[in-house]
Image: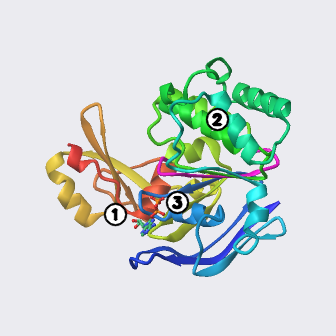
Amino acid sequence: MRLSINSLSKTYSNGVQAIKNVSLTLNEGMFGLLGPNGAGKSSLMRTVATLQEADEGSIQFDGIDVLKQKTELRQVLGYLPQEFGVYPKISAEQMLDHIAQLKGVSNKSERKELAGYLLDKVNLAKDKKKNLGTYSGGMKQRFGIAQALIGKPKLIIVDEPTAGLDPAERNRFYNLLSEIGENTIVILSTHIVEDVSTLCSRFAIIFQGQVLYAGTPDDAVNELNGKIYSKSISKAEIKDYSSRFKVISTQLKAGQLYIRIISETDPGNGFIVSTPNLEDVYFSNIGQKTDINTL
Ligand code: ADP
């Protein structure tokens, strides 16, 4: 199974070019689409999910020409949008029953069994009679996955699913997502680097509508071996260091300010070579991460 996105471009009517000549190939497993807000992640995902048109390019999935055969694609798609609205006054069980009906499961007892199975899978079995309006953010997201799994989709798209979840909820959500990768392609968009390092076998960095990197997290990190240096400096020195070195992040640790820079050669000046991580990959691609405003 393979999803291939070829030279895709999209400009909105207000002139914003949200997708610029994007090409990506995805195989089975979890693929992370990593980028800051406004990078174009949702635009790309909505296009793959057949919810909006592209201006140029093509998308193929398992023999389906996605931009032309929308109905065929929708039959094998599970989608959790960024803004996942729920009807607050009905229960999870009722809502799943309704969605299953819309997806063509006409037999009532089959629907009940399916809803029970899915709610159990996302660990909401004991809360299935509660109204969705009473659910926490994490519970809503897990419910969102349950509804996306109806119909045994082969392609699952989840848009920024961990934004707004607390660490415990995020962990629960990671466990759930890691179980659904088999025999499906899962695309997960996020601005949280940890989502990618925890879950994804492959990923792409998207910024200003363009793909800046695509590959495995390990390869991306290994490419930076011996090129990341760190040093503790004072707040007053930040400007000077930023003008002399390629600073990729500034971080406070136990009240001490550390900067990380990327350099092909030993920068001297008391810098110590540091083990690279996926955050370094991300910020060296999209530009500096700065906590200066919060100092
Ligand atoms: P992300 O999901 O990475 O935050 P989006 O795809 O939502 O990025 O947005 C990419 C760019 O396109 C942003 O500049 C955003 O303001 C713009 N944009 C998104 N949707 C629309 C729309 N429907 N009409 C006009 N501009 C849009």
The reply to whether callout 2 and callout 3 are in contact (CB within 8 Å) is: no
Query: In the image, is residue 212 above or below residue 279?
Result: below
Nearest to the eye among marks 2 and 1: give it: 2
Q: Which amino acid lies under the numbered mark 3 shown in the image of this protein?
A: Ser
Q: Quadrant of the rendered structure where residue 67 is? A: bottom right
Furthest-bottom residue in this view: 56
Q: Which amino acid lies under the numbered mark 2 shown in the image of this protein?
A: Met
Asked whether residue 185 is drawn in magenta, I would say yes
- In the rendered image, the quadrant that contains the C terminus is top left
User: Which disc number belongs to residue 95?
Assistant: 2
Position of 73 with respect to 24 (left or right) is right
Position of 10 with respect to 294 (left or right) is right
Ligand 1 closer than 8 Å to the CB at disc 3?
A: yes
Query: What residue does disc 3 label?
Result: 42
- In the rendered image, the quadrant that contains the N terminus is bottom right
For ligand 1, the image quadrant comes to bottom left
